[in-house]
Image (spheres, grey):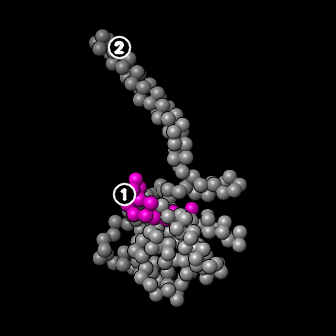
Amino acid sequence: MSSYLKPALVLFALLTLLTGVVYPLLVTALAQGLFPVQANGSLLKNDEGQIIGSELIGQPFSDTRYFWGRPSATSPYPYNAAASSGSNLGPTNPALITTVAARIKALHEADPEKHASIPVDLVTASASGLDPHISIAAAEYQIPRIAKARHIDPAKLHNLVAKHTEDRQWQIFGEPRVNVLKLNLSLADLSRKD
């Protein structure tokens, strides 16, 4: 019996050391050396070095002076990375219809003069509930409201959106998009300079 037990224990200890210590340390070292920003959460910092968010997770913006992101379906609060999930509500579900109607109403209240079609990503949550991006159409839709609230020439905002437009991933996946947090940080900088 001991002839079987000893090799099993040695193999167990060796594999535990290899897969529980050596491999994680190697992967961590490689990630920190090759991709330090991504390995640490793609965090964005302000001028004082304080962390203000991650470029991978959306944040709630409701002030009319800022671009609003895609709604979040996470709970108990929006963009809760610990509770990432979609609403899983179908297109005929009354709860989804009510939620979308409330979001449309909020957009109309924020900019009553706007009568253009609302881009779908401003009223529906993403599958993760954490999406930090909006479409170019969603960003352009919000320019008149922000220009009016900040007393900024809309052309400057169009240029800002164009500057922050990210292309398709590897030129084939997804659509061009705008990271809302990065865009709003540049918008705040623009306002400080004016």
Residue 6, numbered circle:
2
Q: Residue placed at 60% from the left, 74% from the top?
A: 156
Q: Is residue 180 magenta?
A: yes
Q: Find numbered disc 2 in the image and state the secondary structure of the residue it sits on.
A: helix
3D distance between C-alphas at marks 1 and 2: 52 Å
Quarter occupied by residue 131? bottom left
Q: Which percent across, then down, holds residue 22? A: 46, 27
Res. 63 in view: no
Quadrant in which the C terminus is drawn: bottom right
Span highlighted in magenta in the image: 167-182
Q: Is 11 left or right of 184, judged from the image as shown?
A: left
Q: Find numbered disc 1 in the image and state the secondary structure of the residue it sits on.
A: loop
Q: Is 39 left or right of 49, judged from the image as shown?
A: left
Quarter occupied by residue 124? bottom left
Q: Residue placed at 55% from the left, 73% from the top?
A: 158
Q: Which percent across, then down, holds residue 188? A: 65, 68
Q: Nearer the viewer, residue 132 or 168?
A: 168
Neighbours of disc 2 within 10 Å: few (<14), some (14-19), many (20+): few
Q: Residue placed at 36% from the left, 57% from the top?
A: 173
Res. 188 in view: yes
Magenta span dominant secondary structure? loop
Q: Is residue 24 above or below residue 80?
A: above
Amino acid type at circle 2 is: Lys
User: Can you tell which of label 1 and label 2 is closer to the viewer?
Assistant: 1
Residue 173, numbered circle:
1
Q: Earlier in the sequence, mark 1 or mark 2?
A: 2
Amino acid type at circle 1 is: Phe
